[in-house]
């Protein structure tokens, strides 16, 4: 419940402090005094839009603050927000700045307006004129019916909501997989082709570098062998198709023979002797060359094999414009993606079965919800009839008509609240059958019936008595008083018949110096309250008849309690 409310610089209210009773509190005052600002301030705490025009002229901000009693569960949530709870109470506040910004606080911690609204809404409900209009909507009517079903319905809806979330997620995934089946097959085909190209070559890590190094070694050995063979040919000679070709040894031997043929020339003989000696050395060189050439390591077949393998790998790398290390990494990624796509294709059937299973569970859950709604609709409709009768609608009948709707998070029902206001008339949708005043009375009748099934909270009614008066006003006051036995009730009213049933009456007053109008809030009791009730009835606060009538109303209210 709310222990106190502070309002500063909001609309015409300069500064006001409200301390609602634990039971029924009536907020009264002259038209234009600022009663609506009290509800507007509480609406700000509930997260409503912060309109800078609400800031009082000349002020830089409007402030609304409330002390709210909390239970351990709510206290834990507030502490999660960083707020502090002292002695079971938390201070909630909202500042509306003239600079088009607002600030929200819960227990001293700055929070969003939505977070503040959720904390307040867990304990406070405002019923204003707009709420009466919302009662005419199918969504609101379904909510009222589910409230009447109490904890069993809350448990069913919580379970159904979880099922619905799982079903919707799995169904979306299934649709996505089915829609992407063609794209998946195309991607698999591309991956298969890419993998086949690599598998055909099957390169190993670093293989291209290893092959290049081996090719260089083999090529060097071949070059050495070829050079030695050529040197051997030049020294020893070689057989050709046209016959033997003399090497250095043959040519030197021919030169020696020519020199030997010159007899009688000592110098020529000396030269022939030198040629003979050189021939011995050249023969030894030829033998060494021949032996070394035979021994030089060379494997032309392996070199050809290495070059062929290296060319194969390089063609693959050129086609992908990449390196071998990156190719192997990309290929591993392609294999993983291929397995993933194959797995997703295989999972469609399993996912489809799971979606069908969840649909069956949802149908069973929705059936249980529908059954509870049907029984609750009969009970609630019957319970509201006497309440409507007491609120000057003695012949009215209220019916919750349930029909089938597409499956959703709250089941597969839609609800139409039907009202037959007069005997002989067929029930019609509440939005068409009820006037504004009748909507207010239907709303109040429902709240009275629902009161005993809900956790105690603060209920705020903004001019629920609009468009009624006299005996109907007394019945409205009586029912608000009955509500206040379980809940804290605050009503903004213009009817003395309603205010007389309050445990505490707060009056919004205004004053003006000709330039600025100011409003404040004060509690009235004793004679002051009689004067205020008399003013509300006749506009004459000093009328003895009005004072006597006010006393009668107070006696009536106290007698009912």
Image (tube, rainbow, N blue to C red):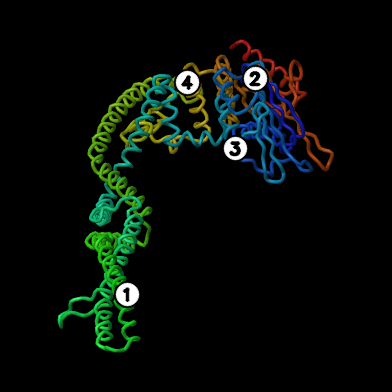
Percent from the top left, x then y, of residue 432? 43, 38
Question: What crowding class fits label 2: few (fewer than 14 Cα within 10 Å), some (14-19), or many (20 or more)?
Answer: some
Can residue 499 be seen in this snapshot? no
Disc 1/disc 4 C-alpha distance (Å): 133 Å
Pointer 4 residue: 450
Using the image as rendered, state which of residue 150 and residue 221 is in the foreground.
221
Determine if residue 187 is in view.
yes
Numbered badge on residue 278: 1
Q: Is residue 113 above or below residue 234?
A: above
Residue at which label 2 appears:
89
For residue 309, what is the image quadrant?
Answer: bottom left
For discs 1 and 4, the disc positioned in front in the rendered view:
1
Determine whether the residue tagged by mark 2 lies in a helix, strand or loop: strand
Q: Earlier in the sequence, mark 1 or mark 3?
A: 3
State how far apart marks 1 and 3 are (Cα): 119 Å
Q: Are marks 1 and 3 in contact (CB under 8 Å)?
A: no
Residue 48 — which label? 3
């Amino acid at each position: 419940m709310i222990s106190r409310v502070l309002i500063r610089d909001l609309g015409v209210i300069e500064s006001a402090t409200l301390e609602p009773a634990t039971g029924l509190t009536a907020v009264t005052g002259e038209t234009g005094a600022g009663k609506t600002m009290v509800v507007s301030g509480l609406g700000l705490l509930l997260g409503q839009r912060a309109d800078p025009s609400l800031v009082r002229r000349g002020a830089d901000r409007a402030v609304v603050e409330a002390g709210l009693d909390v239970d351990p569960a709510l206290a834990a949530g507030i502490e999660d927000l960083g707020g502090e709870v002292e002695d079971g109470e938390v201070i909630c506040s909202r500042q509306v700045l003239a600079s088009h910004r607002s600030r929200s606080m819960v227990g001293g911690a700055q929070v969003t307006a939505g977070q503040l609204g959720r904390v307040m809404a867990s304990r406070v409900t405002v019923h204003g004129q707009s709420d009466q209009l919302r009662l005419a909507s199918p969504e609101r009517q379904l909510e009222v019916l589910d409230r009447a079903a109490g904890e069993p319905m809350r448990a069913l809806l919580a379970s159904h909501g979880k099922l619905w979330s799982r079903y919707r997620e799995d169904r979306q995934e299934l649709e996505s997989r089915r829609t992407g089946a063609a794209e998946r097959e195309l991607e698999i085909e591309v991956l298969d082709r890419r993998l086949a190209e690599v598998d055909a070559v099957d390169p190993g890590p670093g293989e291209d570098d290893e092959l290049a190094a081996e090719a260089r070694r083999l090529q060097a050995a071949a070059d050495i062998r070829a050079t030695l063979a050529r040197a051997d040919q030049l020294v020893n000679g070689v057989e050709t198709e046209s016959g033997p070709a003399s090497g250095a040894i043959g040519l030197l031997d021919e030169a020696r023979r020519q020199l030997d043929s010159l007899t009688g020339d000592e110098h020529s003989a000396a030269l022939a002797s030198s040629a003979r000696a050189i021939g011995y050395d050249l023969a030894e060189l030829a033998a060494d060359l021949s032996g070394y050439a035979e021994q030089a390591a060379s494997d032309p077949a392996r070199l050809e094999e290495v070059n062929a393998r290296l060319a194969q790998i390089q063609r693959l790398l050129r086609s992908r414009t990449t390196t071998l290390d990156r190719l192997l990494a990309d290929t591993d990624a392609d294999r993983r993606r291929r397995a993933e796509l194959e797995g997703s294709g295989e999972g469609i059937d399993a996912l489809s079965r799971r979606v069908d299973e969840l649909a069956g569970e949802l149908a069973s859950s929705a059936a249980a919800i529908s059954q509870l709604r049907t029984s609750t609709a009969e009970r609630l409709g019957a319970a509201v009839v006497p309440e409507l009768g007491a609120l000057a609608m003695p012949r009215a009948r209220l019916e919750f008509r349930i029909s089938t709707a597409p499956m959703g998070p709250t089941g597969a029902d839609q609800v139409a609240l039907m009202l037959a206001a007069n005997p002989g008339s067929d029930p019609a949708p509440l939005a068409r059958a009820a006037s504004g005043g009748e909507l207010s009375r239907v709303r109040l009748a429902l709240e009275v019936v629902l009161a005993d099934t809900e956790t105690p909270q603060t209920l705020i009614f903004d001019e629920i008595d609009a468009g009624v008066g006299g005996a109907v006003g007394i019945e409205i006051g009586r029912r608000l008083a009955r509500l206040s036995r379980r809940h804290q009730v605050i009503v903004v009213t213009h009817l003395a018949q309603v205010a007389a049933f309050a445990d505490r009456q707060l009056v919004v007053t205004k004053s003006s110096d000709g330039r600025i109008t100011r409003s404040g809030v004060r509690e009235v009791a004793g004679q002051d309250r009689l004067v205020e009730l008399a003013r509300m009835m006749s506009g004459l606060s000093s009328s003895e008849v009005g004072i006597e009538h006010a006393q009668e109303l107070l006696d009536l209210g106290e007698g009912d309690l």
